[in-house]
Structure formats: structure tokens, C-alpha cells
Image (cartoon, helix red, strand yellow):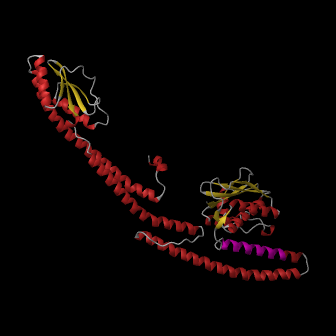
Amino acid sequence: MVLRLKPFLPRGLFGRAALILVLPIVVLQLVVAATFIQRHFEGVTRQMSEGIAIEIRHLLAEVAAAPDLAAAQGRAADLGGALDLVVSLPGGPPAAADARAFWDWSGRVVIQTLRARLPEMEVADLLTNTRQVRAWFRTPWGEMRIEVDRRRVSASNPHQLLVLMVLASVVMTAVAFVFLRNQMTPIARLAKAAEAFGKGQVVPYRPRGALEVRAAGHAFLDMRARIERQIEARTMMLSGVSHDLRTPLTRMKLALSLMPEDDETEALAQDVAQMERMVNEFLAFARGDAMEEAVPVDPAALVTGVVEAAARAGQPVTLGAVDWPVVGGPSLLRLRPDALARALENLIGNAVRHGTRAEVSLITRERMLRFVVEDDGPGIPREQRDEAMQPFRRLDSARNPNSGGGVGLGLAIAADIASSHGGALRLGESERLGGLRAELSVVR
């Protein structure tokens, strides 16, 4: 039952908290109100109906004691007028059966009370005229019909009680929503700040709200400050490492360029080039996109530019479907263009290195933007796909790095960049080309 109702339940914390707070109060008030009103109707209506039954019993006794029909009609008219009853003798054919509206709770009690007190009653009609009780009784002179004002036999609706209860419920619910919103807003701000920091953005945040929420906010600020210090320290260290490593590599390249060309010199030049490529990939992975700020970017132009640059470099890559911009939506998104370009370049390089051609597409979903790179290579087995995205993991251990392969950081860098944009990198099988399908998603 809960699983069936789950799609209709609120997904946000505020909606769920409001449901938990308001639903029991509403249900409790409905149950109490229904029980009180029902008992009020039944108790008061029974007493009033018994009073009318006594009057009708006296009227029936006087009519039955009359010597003839004329005397009976006279007594019925006189006594009916005195008791404020409309009496008809003969009363005509009675209705087929008792009749009342299905929502008429007090009508059920009226009929039950009259039947219990007046065995002579044949039929009671509370439906033809809801403001009257019309009943037929057996007498020695035929059917007698008696009409009674409905207000004399049943309690009227307690409108004041209902209105007061509804107004009190509305006021208390409004007050509860205000207090609930004040409690939920700090949590929503904390979640927004944490989500933004996960994407590399630092938004102003000051802990507010309850003690527990303030404690969580201060813990988040401390964590964010530590991470920022670590990123800054790592960036400074990598800058020094980059300078220290590039300088001797540059000297080695210069010395090799001055040496006579032979097989040994060429082999050394390849080793130096491989070392430089490894250093560049190590630094790119360690640096990530922490130094780049998110700016408004046209994703379609970004993909087109990366594909065109790869094609000019001689890579067999083509541009597939580009589903952007969305009709009625913005044409720009806040992204890190250099980081995304680097991730796409890594995916394209990985695709053309293991296949003969690659295709890049852009797919738009409700909350995500997906950059898809497909190739016609051998792909990656399902059980090795998670391992392939780990740093320094090269699934083909027999491949020589000098053959042009990477050092196992291309997919790891792409996955890290996707994660910093609130998305993920997923590997699958390309249905169109038959090779690997790399899907890099970012939050819109």
C-alpha cells in the first residue's frame, strides 16, 4: 500500500515534514468532529423525537376513542392545532417505504424512535420535504397522516461549531507552516551550499536554525575550509613540481637536439617525450578543474569545437546528434569549458586509440546534459568498467606506453570532471557502432 502511494507523496523535506505535521491533526479533528456531531445528533434527536411521539400517542388515543369519523376528524383538527401538528384524516395512501437522504444521520434516529414508541406508524417520509416529517398511522377510521416541522424532532446542524473548528484549523495550520518553513530553510540553504561546493562553487553561507542544524552548518564550513586549504596547497605543490620536472626535461630535449641523429638518440628522444606526456597527464589529473570558474557556456558550441579540433588533428571523429538548446529553455549553462573540453578530448583519444572511428553526441534530459562518445573498438567488459575509471589502471597490460597508449588517467580525469559538475561518467556498449559508449553527464 505504501509503495503504491509513494509516487504521490512529497519528495522534498519541507513537504514531508508538513505532511507528518498536518495529516495527523486533520485526521484527528475529523474523527473527533464526526464522533461528537454524530453523538450530538443522535442524543438530542432521540430526546426530541420521544417528545413528539408522546404528543402523537395522545392524538392517536383521542382519535381512536371518537364515536364516529366526524367526531374523530374534529378531535384530530382541534388537538393537532393545539399541538402544532398538521393532521389529515383520512390521510390518503401512504408512501411505499420509509424514505430519507443517505446523508441524513438524524433522520435515521427519528424513524427508529417513532417506530419504537408508536407501533401504529406505517411509513415515515423525510425525503419529499426535507423540512418536514410526514408519517402515516393506522386508526379505526382509516389512514391518518401527520406532518411535523423537522426542527421539532431533530437537532439542527451546529454551524457555529463547524465554522469555529475550520477557522481554528486553518489558523493553526498556517502558524505551523510558518514555523516549519523557518526550520526547513536553514537545512535547504545548507544543502544548496554543499551541492554548490561539490560542483566547485563557493556560495556564501552562515549557519542558522536549530542547534543541530547550526552544528551541521559549522561542520560543513570547517570541512569546506580544510578542503580549500588542501586544494590550494596541492596546487602550489604541483606548480613547483611542474617547474622542477619541466626544466630538466627541457634541457634533455635541447641536448638531444644537438646530438647526432642515430638509433640511440631517437630512442632517448622517445623516452623523453613519453616522460613529458606522463608528467602532463599526472599534473592534469592532480589539478583537475579546481582552478577554473564556472561560466555561461553554449554546450553545443563546446562539443562542436572539440570535435572540429580533433578532426583537424587527424583523429577519425565525427559529430552526431546535438540536442541543444531545449525549446523554451536557456541557451547557456554554467559549466567549466576547459575542464569539459579536456574530458571530451580524453574520451575521444581513448575511443580512436582502440577503434577506427568515434562519434560524439549531445543529449538533453530533464535535469541532465549528456555528452556521449561512441567508438567501434572492442569495448570494455562489463565486469571491468568500474576498474577502468580508477586512476593508473590500464586494462591492456601488454600494451607498451611507447606505442601511444596513456598511463591510465584519461577515464579517471573525465570521471572526476563529471563528478565536479554534479554528474557521473558511465561506460556501456554502443548499439550503433558496437564498441564502447562513454556517457559523461552534468547537471543542468
Point out residue 366 in the picture as x, y percentages from the top left corner.
60, 54
Given the current orientation, which residue lies at the most extreme top position? 68
- Could you tell whether 89 is left or right of 13 in the image? left
- Could you tell whether 10 is left or right of 77 in the image? right
**In the rendered image, the vertical position of residue 89 relative to residue 354, given as above or below:** above
**In the rendered image, the vertical position of residue 410 relative to residue 356, given as above or below:** below
Q: Is residue 184 visible?
A: yes
- Would residue 282 be counted in the magenta stretch? yes
The residue at the point 59 percent across, 67 percent down is 199
Point out residue 107 in the picture as x, y percentages from the top left corner.
25, 34
**In the rendered image, the vertical position of residue 81 relative to residue 198, given as above or below:** above
Decide which of 398, 198 is in the foreground and name it. 198
Decide which of 176, 290 is in the foreground and name it. 176
- Could you tell whether 288 is left or right of 78 in the image? right
Q: Which residues are magenta?
A: 268-288
Decide which of 47, 355 is in the foreground and name it. 47
From the image, which quarter does the C terminus lie in? bottom right
**In the rendered image, the vertical position of residue 142 relative to residue 30, given as above or below:** above
Q: Is residue 410 visible?
A: no
- Could you tell whether 227 is left or right of 22 in the image? right
Residue 41 in which image quadrant? top left
**What is the chief secondary structure element of the magenta stretch?**
helix
Point out residue 224 in the picture as x, y percentages from the top left corner.
54, 74
Point out residue 394 in the picture as x, y percentages from the top left corner.
71, 65
- Would residue 30 be counted in the magenta stretch? no
